[in-house]
Amino acid sequence: MSRLSIVAALALSTLASVAGAQDNSSDDWSTPRVHVALSGGTTRFSGGEPGFFIPFQADTNSPTAGGTIAFRLARHFALEGGVAGTWGREENGTETPDNTFATAGFKIPLVSRRVVPYLTLGGALISRNTSDEVGEILEEAFEVSTNDKAAYGGAGLEFRLTRLLGLRGDYRYFRVFPDNVEDVGERESFGIHRILGGVTFSF
């Protein structure tokens, strides 16, 4: 009877230690308090012409790099801010603008595991830097604002290699709402597709 008690006690102790290890491993993949991502990829501007033959933002694909930082507010809810830059290039004899994206919004991880799908949504301020001389002259002549407001939504997937380091892919769609321009009239909103991939750091 005493031997049976000893065996039972050892078995219970083993089960408890296994359960504790499992609990600890699940904690390893909990949503981090601070999450940093450094990414690179491409941005596709689509429909960025207000009419009147003045391409304030030409349709183009632009190389992109940037970073985000997210602070956990709840288990599946984080506040996220970021900055990204796109580099213009020559197309049809015209140098397309450089753009800087400043974003603020929410990141919503759907699970707290090693593979983490997530959703994002928020607002952005997009600052355009036209390097083409003709474009600069036209924008100055028509007093076109170089800052445009936008809203975005997107989704991504992160694979956490360790508790600290991970990899992720991120897609975001921006809807830009440019200000109207005197003597040109109403400018229609246009869309931007952005695809980035990079490394993440969880703290």
Image (cartoon, rainbow, N blue to C red):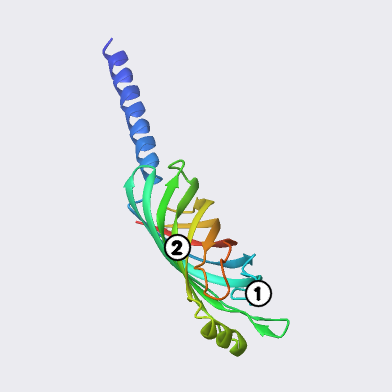
Residue at x 58% of width, y 84% of height: 138
In the image, what residue type sits under mark 1? Answer: Phe
Out of 13 and 131, give the one closest to the viewer.
131
Q: Report the residue marked by disc 1.
A: 52
Out of 21 and 115, give the one closest to the viewer.
115
Residue placed furthest toward the bottom: 133
The percent position of residue 29, horizontal first and vertical second, equals 41, 45
Q: Is residue 6 left or right of residue 148?
A: left
Residue placed furthest toward the front: 183
Element assignment for label 1 = loop
Q: Is residue 42 left or right of residue 111?
A: right
Residue at x 32% of width, y 23% of height: 12
* Mark nearer the N terminus (1 vs 2): 1
Q: Is residue 106 left or right of residue 189?
A: left
Residue placed furthest toward the right: 92
Residue at x 57% of width, y 77% of height: 87
Task: Please determine whether, in this image, residue 60 is positioned above or below residue 23.
Answer: below
Query: Which quarter of the rendering shows the C terminus?
Result: bottom left
Query: Which quarter of the rendering shows the N terminus?
Result: top left
The percent position of residue 192, horizontal first and vertical second, equals 59, 62
Marks 1 and 2, Cα distance to the nearest angstrom?
Answer: 26 Å
Task: Please determine whether, in this image, residue 165 is positioned above or below residue 16.
Answer: below
Residue placed furthest toward the top: 1
Task: Please determine whether, in this image, residue 24 is positioned above or below residue 61.
Answer: above
Whether residue 183 appears in this view of the structure is yes
Q: Report the residue marked by disc 2.
A: 124
Out of 103 and 108, give the one closest to the viewer.
103
Quarter occupied by residue 45: bottom right
